[in-house]
Image: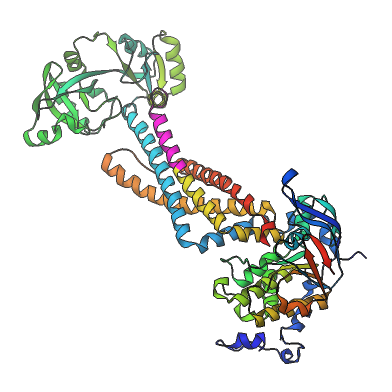
Amino acid sequence: MRPPIDLADVCYAYGSGELARPVLRDVSLSVGPGEIVLLTGPSGSGKTTLLTLIGALRAMQAGSAAVLGQQLMGAREAERVGLRRRIGFIFQNHNLLGFLTARQNVAMTLELEPGTTEQDRLARAGAMLKAVGLGERADALPAKLSGGQRQRVAVARALVGGPGLVLADEPTAALDRQTGHEVMALLRDLAKQRGVPILMVTHDPRILDLADRVVAIEDGRVVTG
Amino acid sequence: MTLLEQEGRGSPPPATPPDAGRSPGPVAWKESEINRLPDLQPQPPQVVAADPRRGRVRASPAFILPVRLAWRQLRAGRTRLASAIAGVMFACVLVFMQLGFRSALFDSATNLPQAMRGELFLVHPLTQALFRTEAMPRSRAYQALAVPDVVSAVPIYFGQANWRNADNGRRRAVQLIGFDAEAGAVAFPGLAGLVDALKQPDTVAFDRRSRPEFGDVAGRLAREGPFEAELGSRRVTVVGTVELGPSFAADGNVVLSETNFRRVMTRRVASNADLIALRLRPGADVDAVKRQLAAALPGDVLVVTQAELVAWERRYWENGTAIGFIFAFGSIMGLIVGMVIVYQILFTDIATHLREYATLKAMGFSQGYLRRVVMGAALILALLGFLPGTLLSVGLYRLLAGATFLPLYMDPSRAAMVFLLIFGMCASAGLLAMRKLREADPADMF
């Protein structure tokens, strides 16, 4: 079976013609089921661009990228939107909708699933929040939650739909050591139990110990891993 | 410290399941519950990948969910919501006022034909409006009597003459309406009691709702009784008042008998009439009589019903003057102002939530879903602004109708039209604001 992420010779450049500035050069990367891979590297090394390509947030330019069985090279917008629904995204900033409660934010993900009822969605969202330790705060607005709590809501939102892959960008950057470690442990447990791979961009040395593999990128090339 | 201990601080202790303490690792997150969530199983890719577009259509009740999201977003910004509703309300009231005045003025312009009491009327085909008639031979009235169902034929004369304001001596043109008051072909309120008085030489009845520039005729009449006034080049006696009201064509009206009309309007050909009102035998078939008359009378007269006469007058003001255009223009201005306000609100809402919108796109919400959110917000604003705007307009109509004597009232068909206009206004604002959505790029989220 093909691994959940299978990249071969991916190249990407910003700008065009004379001004083209390559940020990824012949990147090949494979992530297996349940594997936790950290992407590290100096800023501007292209790791975030790689993450947005894998997340189908950006159109491919060259190479081959199969994510959850979907070839992204030449994929149509509708195919990319469809793939995004099967990926759980966790952003550096929680990006929760401020006018929705924690539970409603999490339930938004489930609105993308056909045939779910409102009751069903809210129940599943509530259960997921309980699982990340926020059962008591499910009906609070994001503004009333601490930074760590918000990031846990974001984790719940990414996981509630049962994604086949989790992509995260510095999810612990805004958190203190303790909370950051807890969020990471949460993700790791999911990956291990469900066989969901996690690809995470991070600078945070405190969480390196939780990874199966660390891939370092420099100047658009994979240097270790 | 575990997450659960953190949660417990300062709030009632959470319902810690008995197995929480047994969870391995530093974090006591509820592993058992994760295991029980069936949807946490990674989904086989082919389920959704089969056809992502079909999945999207069925993903949710396609309109209810975005509209609900729009409502929740609007509701969260109370001040912004209030100003948006006020903006739509303002546009709504403005359009209602413009259209209300327009129709009130057209209605008042048709006061005169509406006060007529006749089943059929004879007019000259070249007549544009009742104040701008082409005269026809008065003998057509007698010819009309040849049709058995016609009981009476009453000639009516229109003219303009100067009325001298007795208070300050200024002269101003007033419309004269000459007819035999006894024939009952015209029913102005107050006229019935003046029938005999108006038979006297050089007597007139004055329209008490005429503009104030003619002097306080009604007040003077009440204080002094009948008094002498100057009409054209004659001295006439004001014997009473009737009610008709000013229109575009006339600032004031004077009612007098046929004979007295000729005494004032000396240059008019005595054998010509401006309008002939026909009373029919009760129960007569109006259409049949109309056809008989049209066949019997020569081409210098047209036979019209009262409804046609009113429409004739109205059409002149609607098409022959700039009035219709002016009020339409006023309405459009109101709609544009309302559109700009709604656009501003929607645009600001999108701009301040750009990151959240981009997040939704990253989660797999389509551009179409977000468009429906914006459109939903626009339509919610249309509805929320229209309802109070209509109520306010009903109140304003009452207030203004009392102050101006113009026939202002809420007409259901006008309300429906204004709703469509406001709806269109908000929808166009939504379409404009949607362009901002393109800036919500999920690739910028990382």
Up/down of A13 relative to A130, above or below: above
Residue B198 lies in quadrant: top left
Task: Tell me where residue B362 appears, x and y as whole percent.
Answer: 70, 60
Question: Where residue A15 sits: x, y (%)?
Answer: 71, 48
* Front-lying residue, B276 or A42: A42
Q: Nearer the viewer, residue A65 or B317?
A: A65
Magenta segment: B318-336
The answer to which image quadrant residue A186 occupies is bottom right
Q: Nearer the viewer, residue A80 or B99?
A: A80
Q: Position of residue B196 (x, y in %)?
A: 16, 25
| Extreme-left residue of the structure | B224
Give coordinates of residue B409: x percent, y percent.
37, 42
Please identify the quarter of the rendering in which residue A81 is found: bottom right
Which quarter of the figure is the C terminus of chain B placed in?
Answer: bottom right
Residue B50 seen by the camera: no
Screen quadrant of the N terminus of chain B: bottom right
Q: Is residue A17 visible?
A: yes
In the image, taking residue B376 as reference, residue B135 lies left or right, namely left
Residue at 76% across / 91% down in the picture? B22
Is residue B324 within the magenta segment?
A: yes
